[in-house]
Image: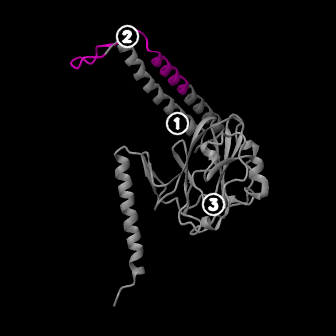
Amino acid sequence: MKTPVSFFEPFKLRSFCFRVLLVVSLVSASGCTVYQSIGKSVGSFLHPVSGHDFVHIDNDSWDRKHAVLYFYRTHSQWAADEIEAPSVYIDDAHYFNIRNDSFTWLVVSPGERHIAMRRPLLGLEGLNSFSLSLIADATFNVEPGRIYYLRYNELTEPTQANPELDPEHPLAQGDLQLVTRDYAMQGQEIVSTRFLNSDLLAPNHAAVSIVESNEDADYERRMALLEEEREVEIERLEREGQYESASWYWPFGGGSKVPLATDQKMEQLEQEYAELELERERREAAESDGWWFF
């Protein structure tokens, strides 16, 4: 008698997931950037969104020095039948997978924010610069005190363009677009969506402030740019005879005959970041003031 295939399916699935997790762990340990949402990418076909109806967050829930990004996905039968939902990344950090007929939000720091969306295959999405399916890849300047609406729909684009964006901007075309508040509200587009809950079947890290993560990412990005700028400055000084490279037999020799401008910039950046961390500690201390622990 032929054994029913369904008897072995759970074991095959567990074995496959174990292998996937093992590969991800090994690759991550090698220093590569692995994009994945294993355990978070379940789609609406398996887990429909059941949160509350759309409502803006309270004004007291965010500081006007920052900004709010609303993400919403309008209903379509294609999205309702989806097995895996696409991932949303801000500054290269994964926050949620957006399912059919849903919305969520993030409080972000002003400045250049990088937004990416990737479609997973059994939770895996890419490695370093390679992506299995890159839905969106855009950077735009976030202004303090502003509220932004990002609409995702893989079948229909908005009927109105955002006048603040250049038509060639990545968020002015494609499946993920930055729309105006009026457009998001008209026709009950965002109002008809439901809140993207975080639960055991589809955990996420949205509906929170990610300001500190943005600030950390800004610091690392600026420092990396300064390190590249420093190398260019050293090459220029070498050509001008103002910099001597250290000898292979005496690595402590050599150096610049004049102060490096990039060293001063890096020192200033480190000082600003140290002040930022000190301010965070003060804020945490103020928030915990008055609590008693037994």
Q: Callout 2: helix, strand or loop?
A: loop
Q: How far separated are the C-alphas under marks 2 and 1?
A: 35 Å
> Which disc, if any, is residue 155?
3
Q: How far separated are the C-alphas under marks 1 and 3?
A: 33 Å
Quarter assignment of residue 108: top right
Residue most toward the left? 249
Q: Amino acid at mark 2?
A: Glu
| Residue corresponding to mark 1 | 217
Q: Callout 3: helix, strand or loop?
A: loop
Q: Callout 1: helix, strand or loop?
A: helix
| Residue corresponding to mark 2 | 240
Residue 34 on image: x %, y %: 42, 49
Q: Is residue 206 left or right of residue 228?
A: right
Is residue 200 one of those drawn in magenta?
no
* Colour scheme employed for the rendering of this structure: one colour
Q: Amino acid at mark 3?
A: Leu
Label 2 crowd (10 A; few <14 / some 14-19 / many >=20):
few
Quarter assignment of residue 165: top right
Q: Is residue 170 or residue 149 the one in the foreground?
A: 170
Q: Is residue 162 above or below residue 191?
A: above
Dots 2, 1 in contact, CB < 8 A = no
Q: Is residue 268 above or below residue 187?
A: above
Q: Give the magenta part as a residue range.
A: 245-274
Is residue 246 one of those drawn in magenta?
yes
Label 1 crowd (10 A; few <14 / some 14-19 / many >=20):
some
